[in-house]
């Protein structure tokens, strides 16, 4: 088979695989927040309960060996896509029910666990199916389609919900239809990937002599991670670098939706889909691409302070929005776009530092552990952010968010980092 044919085969499944990986995450983490706000839950309830949904991504390293050992990665991919579709259908059917919150949360938990398992299998399949050169060549493609899933979820689908709310004058029905659309999407993705995903010879269930041997290797991997030099400073960075952004992310959509009398901007669902899910997501993508390009040119350490400032200081735009409450949708788009551009640029430092920490003999497992701490760093601040906003009001809450950026700067000053790390080794799309 020619190299061109191999690449063409990759194009039949790789973009859709990473689109399928990104959409459940954005549905659980962002679309759920907007939906519950439109269904009139309080900010405290929304932030607390949806923050717990990070848990499957926090603990996914604990069951990643199961995915490696039982069945093939291909089996796990298609099975989880079908299960995700079923969970979305359960959400759609539960929204009109009297106890919709309880039922939809159970279904969102199923989506979260299925999605985290899908992540493990998809990333493993990517490594098994592509050689080193192909992995580097396609990394920008996979990241682009993952971010396209973000735009689809928190942009297009939210806008569709807004249009339906206007046409039907029925908020629960509108969101049920949106989740039925997600259900249909995952049925199609399941059918597509079951047909086109290759079956590489290396994608076989893992071998192990006994469960005791497996447990010993598992413990060895974790012990090696926590024996890393400066592990205390590393963990502080993983948990505190985004402590301000974690709080802002949970309250930004409710702030845009809340009535002006409650301190919000009073935007409609469709407008929030445009502002936060489309313009914001596009600027986030641009920021990530720029960050990867800069790190590849001069190394992460050269740009680290610029990146920590980029992810934190633009949060001040929400202070302006809360006090000025501008009626211009263009001005709101510009403000949110600036914040998301900075977030994309600053998050590059976080991703690259996880790669730096994961270097060594257990790089795949250690990177998974890093992503678990990343999710924990988002979950813990998010748990109390809604209560804090209701206590302080939006204006003072956004001032607090800016104050909460201080730990991010402190941990950046403490972490170990080689001066040349990232230089000429990271593609601009990473």
Image (spheres, rainbow, N blue to C red):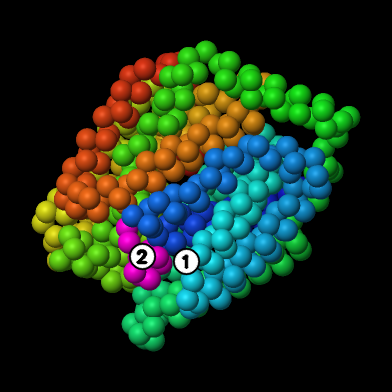
Q: In this figure, which residue is indicated by the disc labeled 2?
A: 41
Between 218 and 295, the residue placed more toward the observer is 218
From the viewer's perspective, is residue 304 above or below residue 44? Answer: above
Tell me which secondary structure the magenta stretch mostly adopts.
helix
Magenta-tinted stretch = 34-43
Between 426 and 330, the residue placed more toward the observer is 330
- Residue 123, by quadrant, is top right
Q: Residue at x 33, y 19 (%)?
A: 413
Mark 2, secondary structure of its residue? loop
Image position, residue 183 (x, y; %)? 59, 70
From the viewer's perspective, is residue 112 above or below residue 241? Answer: below
- Residue 281, by quadrant, is bottom left
- Relative side of 22 to 224, left or right: left
Q: In this figure, which residue is indicated by the disc labeled 1?
A: 101
Say which mark, if any, is on residue 298: none
N-term-proximal mark, 2 vs 1: 2
From the viewer's perspective, is residue 332 above or below residue 54? Answer: below
Is 40 a magenta residue?
Answer: yes
From the viewer's perspective, is residue 126 above or below residue 197? Answer: above
Identity of the residue furthest to the front in this view? 99
Q: Residue at x 59, y 40 (%)?
A: 59
- Relative side of 413 to 76, left or right: left
């Amino acid at each position: 088979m020619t190299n061109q044919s191999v690449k063409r085969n990759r194009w039949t499944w790789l973009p859709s695989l990473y689109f399928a990986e990104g959409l459940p995450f954005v549905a659980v983490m962002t679309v759920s927040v907007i939906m519950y706000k439109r269904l009139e839950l309080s900010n405290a309830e929304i932030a607390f309960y949806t923050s717990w949904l990070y848990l499957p991504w926090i603990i996914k390293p604990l069951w990643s060996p199961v995915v490696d050992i039982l069945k093939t990665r291909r089996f796990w991919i298609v099975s989880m896509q079908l299960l995700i579709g079923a969970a979305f259908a359960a959400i759609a059917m539960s929204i009109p029910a009297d106890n919709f919150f309880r039922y939809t949360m159970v279904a969102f938990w199923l989506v979260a666990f299925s999605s985290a398992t899908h992540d493990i299998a998809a990333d493993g399949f990517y490594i098994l199916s592509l050689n080193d050169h192909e992995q580097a060549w396609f990394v920008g493609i996979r990241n682009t389609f993952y971010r396209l899933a973000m735009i689809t979820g928190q942009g297009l689908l939210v806008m569709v919900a807004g249009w339906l709310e206007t046409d039907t004058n029925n908020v629960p029905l509108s969101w049920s239809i949106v989740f039925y659309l997600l259900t249909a999407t995952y049925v199609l993705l399941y059918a597509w990937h079951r047909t086109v995903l290759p079956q590489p010879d290396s994608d076989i269930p893992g071998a192990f002599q006994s469960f005791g041997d497996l447990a010993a290797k598992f413990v060895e991997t974790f012990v090696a991670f926590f024996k890393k030099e400066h592990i205390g400073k590393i963990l502080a960075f993983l948990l505190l670098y985004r402590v301000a952004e974690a709080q802002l992310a949970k309250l930004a959509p409710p702030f845009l939706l809340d009535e002006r009398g409650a301190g919000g901007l009073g935007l409609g669902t469709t407008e929030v889909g445009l502002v936060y899910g489309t313009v914001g997501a596009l600027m986030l993508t641009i920021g990530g691409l720029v960050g990867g390009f800069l790190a590849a040119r001069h190394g992460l350490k050269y740009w680290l302070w610029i990146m920590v400032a980029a992810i934190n200081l633009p949060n001040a735009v929400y202070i302006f929005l809360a006090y000025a409450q501008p009626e211009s949708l263009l001005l709101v788009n510009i403000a949110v776009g600036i914040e998301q551009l900075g977030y994309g640029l600053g998050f590059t430092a976080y991703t690259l530092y996880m790669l730096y920490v994961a270097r060594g003999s257990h790089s795949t497992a250690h990177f998974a552990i890093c992503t678990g701490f990343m999710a924990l760093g988002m979950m813990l601040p998010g748990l109390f952010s809604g209560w804090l906003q209701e206590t302080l009001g939006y204006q003072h809450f956004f001032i607090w968010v800016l104050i909460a950026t201080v730990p991010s700067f402190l941990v950046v000053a403490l972490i170990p980092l080689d001066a040349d790390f990232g230089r000429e080794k990271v593609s601009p799309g990473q």
